[in-house]
Image: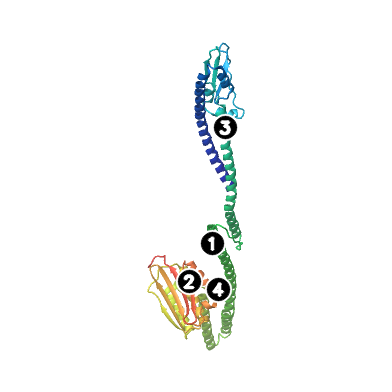
Amino acid sequence: MNAVLRLNLLVAAVFTLVLVITLKGMLQQANKDISREVTAGISFSHQLLSSAANDPHLLRTVLRGEVRHVRLQIIDPTAVEEPVAQAISDEVPAWFAELIPGLEALQDKVYYRYLDDGRALKIQADPSHELAEVWESVQDILMLFGLSVVLSTLAITLGVRQGVKPVADFLSALNAIEKGRYTARLEKYSIKEINDLSEHFNAMAEAVGEAEKENKVLTHELMRIQESERAHLARELHDDLGQYLTGIRAQAYLIKQSAHVPELVASVGQQIAANCDAMQNSFRRLIRELHPVILEQLGLLDAIRTQVDNWRQIHPMVAVELNLPEFLPTFDDETHTHIYRILQESLSNVAQHAAADSVDIRLTVTEERLQLRISDNGQAGIASNGPGFGLRSMQERARCMQGELSFSCDPRQGSVVLLKMPIKEEVL
């Protein structure tokens, strides 16, 4: 059942209830009014007949005239009169007359007045005129209620349709967004509150659409990075480790063929050991690139120190200032990895884009928040390079920790990467 039909039925039920109560009150009041009017008419007739009883001309005039609420009739008192029910006016339905309580008892009221010539004057109550007036009033009430119901139904239908239209538009737009059509928008409405809601919905839909586009870009970028890393790993294994293994195989064959020459065996053995060391270093470098195992071995603070020391060795011309707290709250391994990778990506961006000669790294901890700040004095920092995949990945890492990551870049003051995240874990 839709809203229009539901409201119309509710209004019709209310009108019906009010109509029943009104009609009941009118019928009760009609009984009192008819009784009062008929009694007054009978009393007036008695007074009038008292004066006309001895005057035949006046009596004939009274009998020929119309006396409201009373029926006058001259009868023969010696004749047996059969009781005859009074007929209600043709204007009043019989069923309506039956609804008025006490009407039958009122109609049965009969009075007799005997004249000097031996005849009797029958005076009987006649409520038909008053009953007709009540019926006319009831008809007016019914017409008024009927017109009110029609107008109310029309107003509700038009009003609710106008009010439901924005709701229907919202549902249609939500269904479109649910199906992936993020271009769905709502129109402007004349009602301010609904129009404000429409504008917020359009802004939300636009944000969802932008987020969906960004997710698609990130997905494609992740796939590209994944394939790039696989290709890089394959090249490293083939070009670096593969060469060492080929050299070791050749040296092993040489030892086998030169077993009778101890000096050659010793020289080749040293070469094999050197190749094994170089291959081990290559393995360690690949492992560090794939996953920072040092986090599990040393913890976050020592891993950061090691990372910064290695970066200093690679970039000796850049001065690095490192400030770390004495302790850190207990985080899970994923959080440690996110913080470590954010610092790693920031240093990588400084090396590639900032052209800086100094970097300041500060990690501070309060009871409620951890803050990591990486600033440099470069000319073209992170923010000027646009929101690349590295920046978006850093922001996603911050979002995973329920924190926020901000970038700022000033050609005169350098770039700043600022990570703020809440501390909800237990402190050591």
Q: Position of residue 2 (x, y in %)?
A: 59, 47
Residue occupying the point 59% across, 53% down: 162
Give the residue type at disc 2: Leu
Residue 277 screen position, x and y as percent: 51, 81
Cα–Cα gap, marks 1 and 4: 29 Å
Q: Quadrant of the C terminus?
A: bottom left
Front in this rendered view, residue 151 or 255: 151
Along the line of sight, which residue is nearer the eye, 101 or 62? 62
Do residues under tags 3 and 1 come within 8 Å of each other at their CB atoms? no
Q: Earlier in the sequence, mark 3 or mark 1?
A: 3
Read off the residue under disc 4.
Answer: 389
Q: Earlier in the sequence, mark 4 or mark 3?
A: 3
Q: Is residue 396 above or below residue 91?
A: below
* Residue at the spot of label 2: 405
- Amino acid type shown at disc 3: Trp
Q: Nearer the viewer, mark 4 or mark 2?
A: 2
Q: Quadrant of residue 168?
A: bottom right
Task: Looking at the picture, tell me which residue is in the foreground, 404 or 268.
Answer: 404
Q: Earlier in the sequence, mark 1 or mark 4?
A: 1
Q: Mark 4 to mark 2: distance in Å?
A: 14 Å
Spatial CA distance of label 3 from label 1 is: 59 Å
Secondary structure under badge 3? helix
Q: Residue 213 shows which numbered tag? A: none
Label 3, on which residue? 135
Classify mark 4: residues with Cα within 10 Å, few (<14), some (14-19) or many (20+): some
Q: Circle 1 sits on which residue? A: 200
- Label 3 CA crowd tier, 10 Å (few <14, some 14–19, many 20+): some
